[in-house]
Image (cartoon, grey):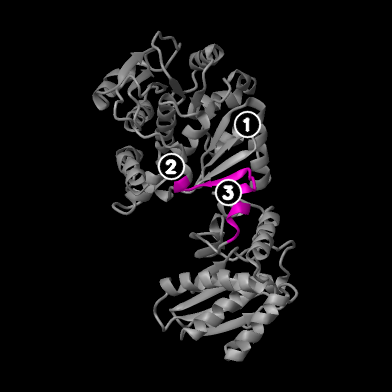
């Protein structure tokens, strides 16, 4: 799903109004009606009181439409007009007159006591047009909303959030109901607290315009994942499903290699070989009887030499940073011509020897978590600075970067895909090792580096989304990711 900036959003509105021969007020009514329908479906209790905070721009107009529809449906509704939140727009004034004619309760910047446990605050103070910091009076209202015991529902954008730069204060929405397509800022780490649950509401914007307008940013939803999925063909056999080599492990960290190897097998790879130190031989052969094993060194890998033919290689999981291991990595990379998946200790070795990054074969995949990423490319001022640095690093070395986080980014050049699956259950040791196995397996099966990364990250996160419906997030482990890969594939193929 494409992600557009504020300028494109406004153009999409204008094209829709022109092509469909409607007014801006009509489009506002349509969009706000979708919010109303969602709210009505989720808050059925007629005892629920709705407190709608409206700025005086078009976002405030949306809020007024929602308030009017809820009031007509029999709900208790109070509207607060937030002075200082924009100049009154034509559509805002039209809808203000409509709620006045109905007799909806309207107050000016008045706070309401936290007495009703069935309270819902609807935030419609600012939308995508915000260009300056809220003044102190408006900031105080945002703080009041955030400190309220009420459920907070934001329309289109949490008020106070900037779409193109760092946000300092914004409504912390329990539910964010955004129009037509996602916005980049929603998925950046600095803004997680403002967007707890995101719903994308279709408001009927011109489909041709959306299809033909390019974007460097995408949200990897189910549809995007299925575009890249390669179903298992009826005549497939182990020789057609690729051979993956996973290089990793050291004394005390053989588990990392085990997780990667098993994940590669469970993701559909025909053959998987583990390249590990001798101390892990019996562990891997016992834990994963389906895997083949090559050993080198006793407690850690000292050289990387083999004669087997493989389709993809993943390296770094638990491999350690011994001097001989570092030299082995250098020699290995120097000899490679095909893309490699690089993780964990291998990334830390590269961070300590940044000139070695030039050895990476084109289209290699690196999978750093935030600290590993910082070691590789330095610190960043904010999330938008981080995005620019990621794009620069990817273009410089012609690599794919899987920047792991709560919302993992897949970066190739200027193009960034933001993953939509996964939850806090993945915050457990070994989940990154599993991801390396998944991506390497997909590479071996013939996926491109970009598609293997995008689809692999989506599949990896989907396991956790399925699992938390059956077990607690706290008890979820990296091994559970592997066990739920089958259900994740089933979820895609059955519902797809």
Q: Nearer the viewer, residue 376 or 70?
A: 70
Q: Which mark is residue 2?
A: 3
| Mark pair 3, 1: CA separation | 21 Å
Q: Are the residues flagged by discs 2 and 1 in contact, CB closer than 8 Å?
A: no
> Residue 380, can we see it?
no
Q: Which residue is mark 1?
A: 394
Q: Is residue 408 above or below residue 350?
A: below
The picture quadrant where one finds residue 490 is top left
Q: Callout 2: helix, strand or loop?
A: helix
As for residue 300 lying within the magenta part, the answer is no
Mark toward the start of the polypeptide (3 vs 1): 3
Q: Is residue 229 above or below residue 362?
A: below
Q: Callout 1: helix, strand or loop?
A: helix
Q: Nearer the viewer, residue 450 or 237?
A: 237
Give, as a single range, the part of the protein colored magenta: 205-223
| Mark pair 2, 1: CA separation | 25 Å
> Residue 375, can we see it?
yes
- x 32%, y 41%: residue: 480
Q: Nearer the viewer, residue 466 or 449?
A: 449
């Amino acid at each position: 799903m494409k992600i557009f900036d504020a300028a494109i959003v406004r153009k999409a509105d204008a094209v829709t109004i022109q092509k469909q021969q409607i007014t801006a007020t009509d489009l506002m009514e349509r969009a706000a009606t979708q919010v109303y329908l969602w709210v009505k479906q989720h808050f059925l209790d007629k005892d629920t009181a709705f407190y709608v905070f409206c700025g005086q721009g078009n976002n405030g107009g949306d809020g007024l439409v929602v308030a009017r529809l809820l009031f007509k449906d029999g709900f208790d509704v109070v509207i607060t007009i937030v002075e200082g939140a924009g100049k009154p727009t034509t559509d805002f004034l039209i809808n203000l007159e409509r709620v006045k004619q109905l007799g909806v309760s309207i107050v000016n910047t008045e706070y309401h006591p936290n007495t009703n446990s069935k309270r819902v605050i609807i935030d419609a103070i600012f939308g995508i047009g915000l260009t300056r910091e809220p003044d102190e009076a408006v900031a105080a209202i945002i703080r009041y909303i955030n400190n309220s015991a009420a459920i907070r529902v934001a329309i289109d954008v949490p008020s106070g959030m900037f779409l193109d730069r760092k946000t300092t204060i914004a409504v912390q929405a329990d539910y964010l109901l955004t129009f037509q397509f996602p916005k980049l800022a929603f998925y950046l780490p600095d803004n997680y607290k403002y967007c707890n649950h995101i719903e994308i509401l279709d408001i009927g914007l011109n489909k041709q315009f959306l299809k033909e307008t390019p974007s460097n940013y995408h949200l990897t939803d189910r549809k995007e994942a299925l575009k890249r999925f390669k179903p298992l063909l009826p005549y497939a056999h182990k020789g057609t499903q690729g051979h993956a080599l996973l290089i990793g492990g050291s004394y005390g960290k053989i588990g990392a290699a085990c997780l990667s190897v098993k994940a590669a097998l469970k993701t559909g790879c025909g053959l998987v070989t583990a390249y590990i130190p001798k101390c892990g031989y019996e562990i891997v052969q016992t834990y994963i009887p389906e895997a083949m094993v090559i050993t080198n060194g006793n407690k850690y890998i000292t050289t990387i030499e083999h004669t087997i033919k493989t389709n993809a290689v993943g390296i770094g999981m638990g491999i350690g940073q011994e001097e001989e291991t570092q030299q082995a990595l250098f020699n290995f990379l120097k000899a490679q011509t095909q893309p490699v998946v690089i993780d964990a200790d291998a990334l830390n070795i590269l961070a300590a020897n940044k000139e070695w990054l030039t050895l990476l074969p084109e289209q290699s995949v690196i999978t750093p978590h935030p600290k590993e990423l910082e070691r590789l490319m330095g610190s960043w001022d904010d999330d938008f600075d981080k995005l620019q640095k990621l794009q620069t690093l990817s273009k410089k070395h012609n690599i794919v970067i899987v920047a792991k986080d709560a919302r993992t980014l897949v970066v190739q050049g200027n193009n960034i895909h933001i993953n939509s699956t996964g939850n806090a259950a993945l915050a457990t040791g070994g989940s990154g090792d599993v991801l390396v196995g998944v991506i390497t397996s997909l590479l071996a099966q013939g996926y491109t580096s970009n598609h293997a990364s995008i689809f692999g990250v989506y599949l990896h996160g989907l396991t956790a989304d399925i699992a938390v419906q059956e077990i607690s997030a706290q008890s979820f482990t990296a091994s559970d990711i592997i066990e739920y890969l089958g259900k994740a594939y089933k979820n895609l193929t059955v519902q797809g």
